[in-house]
Amino acid sequence: MVGKESSSARRLEGRAKGSPGDEGSRGRLRQLLTPESELRNSSWQAPPAGFQAISEESQLPRRVGAGDHLFLVPSFELAEALIARGADSARIAVRHEEGAEDWIQALTKSLPGDPLIPPRPFRFPWRSLVILPTYNERENLEQMTQAIFRYLETEILVVDDNSPDGTGGLADQLAAKDKRVRVLHRTRKEGLGKAYLAGFRLALEEGYERIFETDCDFSHAPWDLPRLMAASETAELVIGSRYVRGGSTVGWALPRVMLSRGANLYTRSWLGFKVHDWTAGFRCYHASLLKKLDFDRVAANGYSFQIEMTWKSLRLGAKVREIPTRFVDRNLGKSKMNKKIALEAIRIVPWLRLKG
């Protein structure tokens, strides 16, 4: 968890500095990071145990087994290939635009089990907005905004449905301190779909180019946001999928797993497209795609909202890409899933197909 950062820092204070790495480790980094002068002037320390630098597809392992493997790769494409083979996205360093020295320092400070924190938030050429719908998320909100900014250069819109626990007031305080945080207050709880549609409208009015959906409870990993952004270069809708190779769920009881998988199989059998995770709430949309959708004609409001948005996007001919993500059952607060939401999904899928 990102929230472990402070405890990790305290542990680091008492940790002795690493000795110079062996020539094998140096050679792997030199091959990947080049030019040689970058490393010659660096304050090199030994990489963590299990470290592996990969510079091209031919070096990828067939399968990444259990354990604290840490990888350094030059691109998000190689990162995706690693994750599909079983690697943990939290332990993959993507160089992207960073220099060798900065990543070396980040790697040497990485502790087993902790998500790797990049030297700086990832930057992309598109103006982006992360929409956080909230209802009684006071325990999570500040940590979540901090985590998002740690991994991605973006802005955040908190859409609060008049939370009784004071989430909206906390959001205002955060916005007053940081201009990257914005707040949209709604007078009452109206459901996930309406919250996202309100956020989409604001995003389109103000010229954002990439719009993200995510939860405020750390069920979706904030370090995966840059992966969704990178994948959006070639897809108008990117879905963080639990059900493609490399994706998973953590902390669900068997009935919940069966319900989710059954809902996606049911949806796929009715609607026909080869999407594996129709109900996923971790997404990145192109603004150009959202502009083509008539929000006033979106009927679903619960988790089936995701099904309807995916269906409408596909019907418009949008390219949809799924990348594997790990969904972790919420750490704080109470799940919003209930019987009414599940029944809505059962009804909406045949209606979408019959409506055409």
Image (tube, grey):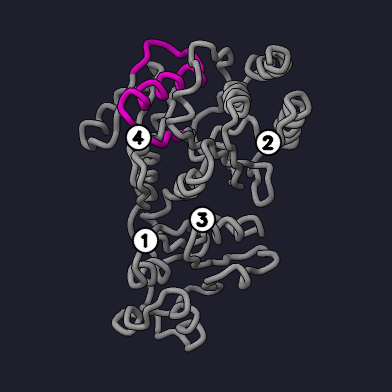
Residue on which the image places disc 2 = 275
Measure the C-alpha gap from mark 3 to mark 4.
Answer: 22 Å
Quadrant containing the C terminus in the rendered view: top right
Task: Pick whichever, 301 or 268, lies toward us.
Answer: 268
Residue on which the image places disc 4 = 156
Question: Viewed as shown, does residue 218 lie left or right of 38?
Answer: right
Is residue 337 visible from the viewing direction of this image? Answer: no
Residue at horizontal 35 percent and vertical 51 percent from the top: 123
Secondary element at image label 1: loop
Question: Viewed as shown, does residue 320 lie left or right of 270?
Answer: left
Q: Nearer the viewer, mark 3 or mark 4?
A: 4
Counting residues from the N terminus, which is met first, the one under dot 2 or under dot 4?
Answer: 4
Residue on which the image places disc 3 = 90
Residue on which the image places disc 1 = 97
Secondary element at image label 2: loop
Measure the C-alpha gap from mark 1 to mark 2.
Answer: 32 Å
Check disc 3 and give the amino acid type.
Ala
The residue carrying pointer 2 sits among few (fewer than 14), some (14 to 19) or many (20 or more) residues within 10 Å by Cα, namely many
Counting residues from the N terminus, which is met first, the one under dot 4 or under dot 1?
Answer: 1
